[in-house]
Image: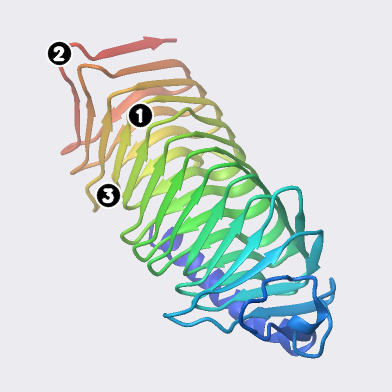
Amino acid sequence: MSNSCCLPRVLFCLTLLLITFSQTHASTITWKGIPNTTDWHTPENWIGDIVPSAADSVIITGGNINSLNIVLISADAVALHITIDGYSELGILLSTSLNVSNAPGLSIKIEENGSLLNFGSLTVSNSFSGFNILGKFENHEDCTIHSMVSNGIYLHGTSSSKNKGELFIMDTDLAFLSEEAAQYTNEGFMSLEDGTTGITNSSNTNFENKGRIDITNMERHGILNFETFVNNGPLKLDSIASGFLSVAVFNSSGYFENNSNIVMSNILGTAIINGSTSDLGVFLNSGIILVQDAKVLGLVAEPMSKFTITKNGSLVLKSIGFTPFDILEGGVFEVEDGGFVNIIN
């Protein structure tokens, strides 16, 4: 488990090195921060009087605690890399687009107290890393992140972000990573596809799903949870399949609560592991969990862990390759009166 925890930090350090390289070898265009002007497409609003191109690294700055600096994209726009400083806000308006691509390092960084609001179409592609968010990111329409070497979205610090539209992260090693007291809410649709791990939730973070999440074709983990994950909407995990060590939901040392429907299928390894050899994992299921075609194990309860099916909850394990349950010494699996468990092999 320590290797899983350290990997995101190692990749983030590599990202910082590549950001330094990319900013050194690209033209940098900085927002002037002139009062009462918000238009991205006006040359005079930028130092050098030139609108950013696809080869430019963009810095949006000029705001302060008493005066928020707002920049609006009202037509199609492009950039190599974007940094949004504190008390600055970038807005993508309805029926417009922003394409950020081909950065050797990081594509978009949102500093603490900075924000990015997308009401149009946002595409981030072909870079080492997608988003580094210390501030706020809200997607209200369409956001696609693809072809990243490292991570798609990295939330940390005191970041508070949400998705209300459609968010697609594809062909990216660590699709979604949150840590350091970050808060994230999905109220729309998230699709995470083709990577190593779909969602990694760690270090005092809270992740809540109120919409729908599909996680498909991950090599190692669908969800790796160390903190608080609350599922209140449909969640699908399909084809978690690099080998026998792959796990659809690994609730290592966290609190995982399901109040909706979770469907897991085509799992080459284990469907659910609750807890680890040295950490307490708490899993509370008040919804429906259907596991089918897990090639090794259905549910593993590690020592010190507790898995509870409430009176409103149900667990169905179908076509489990090795054994449906592996309750280790010290691990707790309990079904409250009214709860339902069904094993179909």
Count neighbours of disc 2 (C-alpha within 10 A) and say few if under 14, some if 14 to 19, many if 20 or more: few
Question: Helix, strand, or loop for circle 1?
Answer: strand
Kind of residue at badge 1: Leu
Give residue 277's mark.
3
Give residue 103's mark.
none
Count neighbours of disc 3 (C-alpha within 10 A) and say few if under 14, some if 14 to 19, many if 20 or more: some
**First of labels 1, 3 by sequence position:** 3
Q: In which quarter of the image is the C terminus?
A: top left
Determine the CA span between mark 1 and mark 3.
Answer: 15 Å
Q: Quadrant of the N terminus?
A: bottom left
Could you say where residue 46 lies in the image, as x and y percent from the top left?
75, 83
Give residue 337's mark.
2
Q: In this view, does 62 lie to the left or right of 262?
A: right
Could you say where residue 88 lies in the image, as x and y percent from the top left?
55, 74
Q: Residue at x 72, y 70 (%)?
A: 39
* 34 and 251: which is toward the camera: 34
Task: Residue under label 1, please give it.
Answer: 299
Give residue 85's quadrant in the image: bottom right
Give residue 103's quadrant in the image: bottom right
Asked whether the beta carbons under mark 2 and mark 3 sit within 8 Å of each other, the answer is no
Question: Helix, strand, or loop for circle 2?
Answer: loop
